[in-house]
Image (cartoon, rainbow, N blue to C red):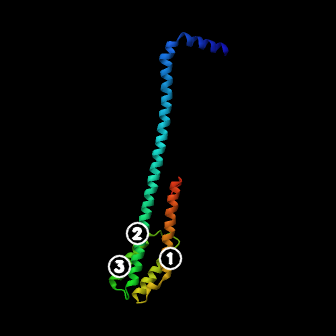
Amino acid sequence: MLEFLNLFNEWIKSHKELVTVIGVPAITYLVTSLMNKSSERRAANERHVERVLARELKLSEFRQNWINELRLDFSQYLGILASLQPISKEETNRLSLIINKILLRMNHHDPDFKKLTETMTQSLKSAESRHSPAENPDLIVLMGKILKREWERLKQDLSNSESGGKLT
């Protein structure tokens, strides 16, 4: 092995110009190629992270808009019920439309979906039969509970996206 190293060293000494002209550029090319590939991988990873974060933030915006629209539908529903005694056919139709909007916005697997549906339907029937549905604190509490749960979920999703987690 020592003999090989001595021969190799002698060859390099006798061919300095050749080593300088070919060897240095070849080593420079290899190092540059490796650095470029590493840089490209790092840039691709950063672009991927940016896309994921942008998507998660957009989903959070959509969820925030959904919560705001649901809150508006809840308040319109409760406002009509509280202001009209007895309720007209036109307002009954408007309330039915709002109920349908609420139900279409809601997740049918939500733990309070069935109770919300039943309570809103019962309140509408009470309004049609001239009872006072505005005195239904259970409905207001239930709507508040749903909004609060969704707000907490939104906050959790934003917290997860800041820490690199996934939206739920």
Q: Which mark is residue 124?
A: none
- Give the CA separation, mark 1 to mark 2: 17 Å
The kind of residue on which mark 1 rests is Leu
Instruction: Inspect this view and state whether residue 168 appears.
Output: no
Identified by mark 3, the residue type is: Arg
What residue lies at 44% left-to-right and 53% top-to-bottom? 54
**Residue 8's x, y, as percent?**
59, 14
Does residue 18 lie above or below 85 as drawn? above
Which residue lies most toward the right here? 2
**Disc 3 from disc 2: Cα separation:** 16 Å
In the picture of the structure, the residue carrying the numbered disc 1 is 142
Residue 69: mark in rendering = 2
Mark number, residue 94: 3
* Residue type, label 2: Glu
Up-down relation of residue 3 to residue 41 (above or below): above
Task: Say if mark 3 contacts mark 2, CB within 8 Å.
Answer: no
